[in-house]
Amino acid sequence: MRRAAVFLALLLCLLWTGARGEDQSSSETQVSIDVWAELKELRDLAIEHRIKIQRLEQDNTATQVRLTASESKNAESRMSSSEKDVGEFKRANTVLENRVSSRGKEVEQLQRPNAEHMARVTASENKSTAFESRMSSSRLQVAFSAGFNDSGAVGPFNTTITLKYSKVFTNVGQDYSPTTGIFTAPVRGVYYFRFNVWENRGSVHTSVELHHNDQMKMRLYDYNDSVGYVSASNSMVLQLERGDVVYVVLSSGYGVYDDSFNRMIFSGFLLFPQ
Ligand SMILES: *[C@@H]1O[C@H](CO)[C@@H](O)[C@H](O)[C@H]1NC(C)=O
Ligand SMILES: *[C@@H]1O[C@H](CO)[C@@H](O)[C@H](O)[C@H]1NC(C)=O
Ligand SMILES: *[C@@H]1O[C@H](CO)[C@@H](O)[C@H](O)[C@H]1NC(C)=O
Ligand SMILES: *[C@H]1O[C@@H](CO)[C@H](O)[C@@H](O)[C@@H]1NC(C)=O
């Protein structure tokens, strides 16, 4: 644009000086008129162009303004969409966290029975350690003696019941259980057992049995003896395998009597292991 204007100015100067120099001849005058007309045209064209350029420049500015506006809008929309993304990410994260915490709970729940199991394992290991230490001692000690339950009269019942001698006097090795009334052999060996029966009801027959596993080994029996008080006792030496059980049962249809005088006792001990 500026170049065009400079060019035009130069052209005008040249033509003007030329025209001044050749004033005299009529042909020259004609040429001069033509040149002036042409110059006028050129000037008009230049003005037209300048206006056009001005318009274009204005348009351009407007476009730039619009562009800036739309860019910022775009940025805004990008922002809001990225905010949305953040929201969704947070939501997904919460879901994940929940999952993680529920997984944590699952793990806890899985660990709990495992801990119980480990405690049981430890307990049984303790037991076997205790057993080993018992076995390694120069003489394995097994001896128990327990009285019945101060119940007074018991029975008769129409079924056989295992007598639970709950008053423990001696229980070296804890092989007798006062809650079940059952002695369990800790080792294969020869054992001695003693038990008795007592009854003070003159009309009631009394009888208890010694059992080795599911076998009855012997039955005690007595009745009245004219005064009404009866007592009977016996003992047995039994050869037991490790884990064999020995216990006393009240025969079906018979009664016994026990009180604080410890009328009924169940005792046993290991003679020797085998
Ligand atoms: C196992 O024995 C140890 C040491 O005697 C004792 O501290 C622990 O409580 C025992 N555990 C069980 C489960 O009996
Ligand atoms: C004693 O044992 C007998 C027979 O098992 C039972 O019926 C009774 O309730 C017991 N008595 C006591 C005080 O435990
Ligand atoms: C066994 O005893 C119970 C109650 O002690 C009684 O109801 C039942 O009839 C008896 N059964 C027999 C076969 O005697
Ligand atoms: C045995 O016990 C005495 C004491 O209680 C009674 O007096 C007797 O009648 C009883 N005899 C029989 C057969 O039951």
Image: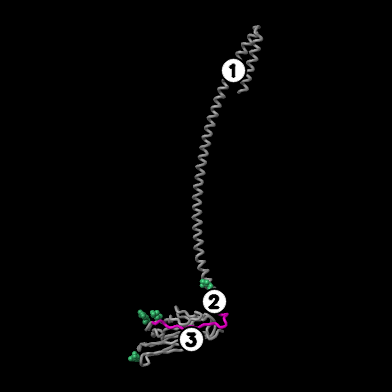
- According to the image, label 2 marks what residue? 130
Q: Position of residue 202 (x, y in %)?
A: 35, 89
Graded by Cα atoms within 10 Å as few (under 14), some (14 to 19) or many (20 or more), the crowding at tag 3 reads many
Identified at 64% across, 10% down, the residue is 20
Q: Earlier in the sequence, mark 3 or mark 2?
A: 2
x and y percentages locating residue 37 in the rendered image:
60, 13
Q: Earlier in the sequence, mark 1 or mark 2?
A: 1
Q: Which residue is mark 1?
A: 43
In the picture, residue 161 is in which quadrant? Answer: bottom left
Range drawn in magenta: 133-150
Q: Is residue 137 magenta?
A: yes
Mark closest to the chain's N terminus, 3 or 1: 1
The reply to whether the residue tagged 1 has its Cβ within 8 angstroms of ligand 1 is no
Disc 2 on helix, strand or loop? helix
Regarding mark 1 in the picture, which secondary structure is present there? Answer: helix
Is 34 on the left or on the right of 193, as rendered? right
For residue 162, say whether it is visible.
Answer: no
